[in-house]
Image (spheres, rainbow, N blue to C red):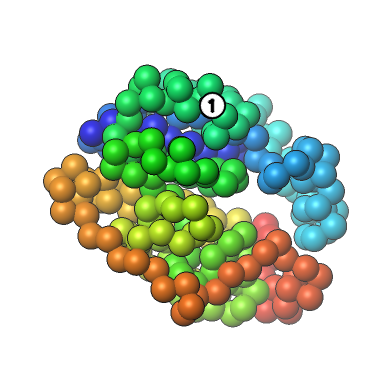
Amino acid sequence: MKAVYLTTDDPIYLPAFYDRALGASKTIPQAVFVVPPLYRKQTAGDAALRYARTFGWSAAARLAARVLSAKFAGRSIAASCARAGVPCEEIVDVNAPGFLDRLRAMAPDVLISVSCPQIFKQPLIELPPRGVLNIHGAILPHYRGVLPSFWMLANGEKQAGVSIYFVNEKIDAGDRCGLRMFDIEERDTLDSFLRRSKAIAADLLLEVLERMEAGDVAREPLDLTQGSYFSWPDAEAVGRFRAAGRKVW
């Protein structure tokens, strides 16, 4: 079974994910395509300003320092791909007709979205014969949307999870085919939570791909009426996050 990964430029959390996932997968990874870590028509400056206004300038400075440190140390998705012998390339738009033509020529069996911030349109969803998988850091259908890790900590949840599902045109709304739950620890920061979640996500993905290879993957439709959806945090949510004793780093 051949797979193409669609992901975003993240030197902090995703290199470890790809070291874990690409190195142990029996599925053939044809390529990893990386899009900018931006939503809709954001610029890099817009994204940095929004982060600083939400979590504070101190947290934003810490994030910038971590990104620079990772880059100086050579930690990147491209480096992880090079170690696994998998082509890695930056692209702008996963739905662009020219990119879809490239994918058709590659003929992957499955596409795998890992933190890709772009909304997938129907031509992309219908392209691979075995579907498009997306990894979401929550127990779907709960905590759909943006930054589920933050919202679970802000809301005082005791248990978290990682879900893998088949993508449709709705957000975080396809058939779930993998779930792994884990406890949230009292000492967890947003950073430590994300690191543990990405490691669990990589292991769960390997399990789902193995089941797909064997032809026995189970699909469970998500009941969105029983779930919840969250957008980018506002000041009140950040206040609850801090009042619960949580920190970003």
Q: Nearer the viewer, residue 177 or 123?
A: 123
**Quarter occupied by the C terminus:** bottom right
Which residue is found at the position 23% from the left and 60% from the top? 218
Which residue is found at the position 82% from the left and 44% from the top? 46
Task: Identify the image quadrant of residue 151.
Answer: bottom right
**Quarter occupied by the N terminus:** top left
Q: Residues within 10 Å of mark 1 (few under 14, many from 20)?
A: few
Quick check: can you spot residue 36?
A: yes
Q: Nearer the viewer, residue 80 or 227?
A: 227
Which residue is found at the position 46% from the left and 38% from the top? 123
Q: Amino acid at mark 1?
A: Pro
Q: Is residue 217 left or right of residue 18?
A: left
Q: Nearer the viewer, residue 14 or 232?
A: 232
Q: Is residue 149 left or right of residue 208?
A: right
Q: How far across and how far down the image is residue 223, in percent?
A: 41, 73
Which residue is found at the position 54% from the left and 69% from the top? 143
* Residue identifier under label 1: 97
Circle 1: element type: helix
Q: How far across and how far down the image is residue 64, in percent?
A: 75, 41
Figure label count: 1
Q: Examine the rendered structure and indicate whether residue 226 appears above or below residue 116.
A: below
Quick check: can you spot residue 15?
A: no
Q: How far across and how far down the image is residue 74, in percent?
A: 58, 26
Q: How far across and how far down the image is residue 108, in percent?
A: 33, 30
Q: Examine the rendered structure and indicate whether residue 173 appears above or below residue 120.
A: below
Q: Is residue 45 left or right of residue 225?
A: right
